[in-house]
Image (spheres, rainbow, N blue to C red):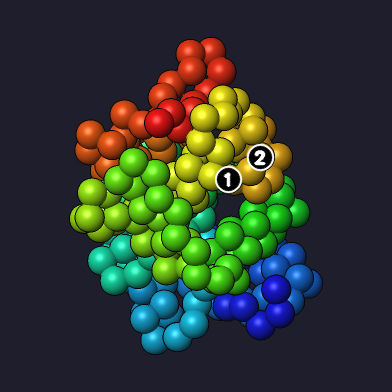
Amino acid sequence: MENIKVLVVDDEERMRRLVKDFLTKKGFIVLEAGDGAEALDVYFSNSGIRLIILDVMMPKKDGWQVCREIRQYSKVPIIMLTARSEESDELQGFELGVDEYVTKPFSPKVLTARVEALIRRTTPERSEEIVESHGVSINKSAHKVMVDGKEIDLSIKEFELLEYFVDNKGVALSRERILNNVWDYDYYGDARTIDTHVKKLRSKMGAKGDLIKTIWGMGYKWDE
């Protein structure tokens, strides 16, 4: 993870320094911003930022506003930090294209692990590979999905979830297995995260979303 730029946005300097210290030890280059307006200035004036850690409650512009503006131009991975754990907040984050959602207080070590995992998953290392299944075409290297010949716009997490389903077509996948493979870390919490992403993925796929079958009490399966 040497020389990868990460932007940490939080109005609490102590929190920024804590996160920066842990990331710097792992070889990341850490940029900082203390409010939403500064975050946008830093992001758009520095090329090559690979990930953003973004607090929700900030002066000038809150995290939701910052995320909304960045998503108009970029799919850079975003980890949202919040002191609240309400379901509505988490759902709003996913609607805006947030890739991870972390509730304060959190372990800096766990946050660092999530950053590393998200960077690995969004680094193009695979050769050109296209997988097709019943009108759904996944170009893994280009991160592109076509449904019945029409490209659909997926978030990073939605793409990875679809890719995992198709790679394991016909296999009943528990929520725990999906979390451990798609999210790439030991996830402690309920299955709301998976269910939310599956719901959005199905919606974007239209009629082809029915290929993702719910296995009640267990998880999901790509069923041809």
Q: Is residue 45 above or below residue 7?
A: below
- The structure residue drawn at horizontal position 52% and vertical position 30%, both measured from the top left corner, is 170
Q: Judge whether residue 31 can be spotted in this image.
A: yes
The tally of labels here is 2
Q: Amino acid at mark 2?
A: Asn
**Residue name at image x 57 percent, y 29 percent:** 171
Name the element at disc 1.
helix
Of all residues, the one furthest to the top in this rendering is 217
Q: Are marks 2 and 1 in contact (CB under 8 Å)?
A: no
Residue 205 at x, y percent in the picture: 27, 42
Name the foreground residue: 66 vs 119: 119
Between residues 51 and 165, which one lies in front from this camera angle?
A: 165
Q: Residue at x 58, y 78 (%)?
A: 5
The residue at which mark 1 appears reads as 182
Residue topped by disc 2: 180
Drawn side of residue 198 relative to residue 194, left or right: left
Q: Residue at x 66, y 40 (%)?
A: 180
Q: Nearer the viewer, residue 76 or 84?
A: 76
Residue 8, compared with residue 219, is above or below; it is below
